[in-house]
Image (cartoon, helix red, strand yellow):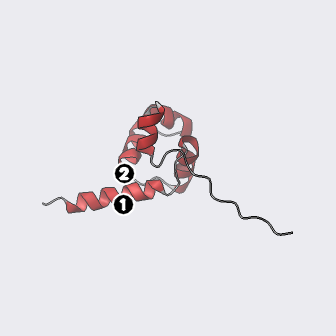
Amino acid sequence: MHKRSRRPRRCKYQTLAEYLLRSGHTQRDVATAVGTTQAYVSMIAAGRVNPNALLSAAIAHHCDVPLGSFLIEHLAYLARASAVPA
């Protein structure tokens, strides 16, 4: 019997920032749901930090965002920060 390959499920939101903007949930709601602080969720949403794998997975599942979106946002933040003239 040949198994059909399943397509990856498309997430409803592309980033944590988009989730927060469109869902009506707050940073505190997300923080409480995944066991971290509102301040840390704020830094993640801004791309200032890249959360560890366990926290990334918890947020991605709770907020229906792609797991890789945290790294992409963090790398974009680092690129913007390095482009600022001294």
Image quadrant assignment for residue 73: bottom left
From what the image shows, is residue 22 above or below residue 82? above
> Residue 21 appears at what percent x and percent y?
41, 36
Q: What residue type is labelled 2?
A: Gly
Q: Which amino acid does label 1 sit on?
A: Leu
Q: Check disc 2 and report its element: helix, strand or loop.
A: loop
Front residue (pair 12, 46):
12
> Who's the residue at 31% across and 59% down the image?
78
Q: Farthest residue in the right direction?
A: 1
> Who's the residue at 41% across and 47% down the image?
44
Q: Check disc 1 and report its element: helix, strand or loop.
A: helix
| Distance between the alpha carbons at the discs numbered 2 and 1 | 8 Å
Front residue (pair 22, 83):
22
Assess disc 1: are there few (<14), some (14-19) or many (≥20) residues with their C-alpha within 10 Å of its C-alpha: some
> Who's the residue at 37% across and 51% down the image?
47
> Residue 49 appears at what percent x and percent y?
38, 52
> Residue 58 appears at what percent x and percent y?
57, 46
> Who's the residue at 44% across and 35% down the image?
22
From what the image shows, is residue 33 above or below residue 12? above
CB of mark 2 within 8 Å of CB of mark 1?
Answer: yes
Q: Quadrant of the N terminus?
A: bottom right
The answer to whether residue 5 is left or right of residue 18 is: right
Work out whether mark 2 precedes mark 1 in sequence or the reverse, and give the earlier one: 2
Residue at numbered disc 1: 75
Residue at numbered disc 2: 47
How many numbered dots are placed on residues in this image? 2
Q: In which quarter of the image is the C terminus?
A: bottom left
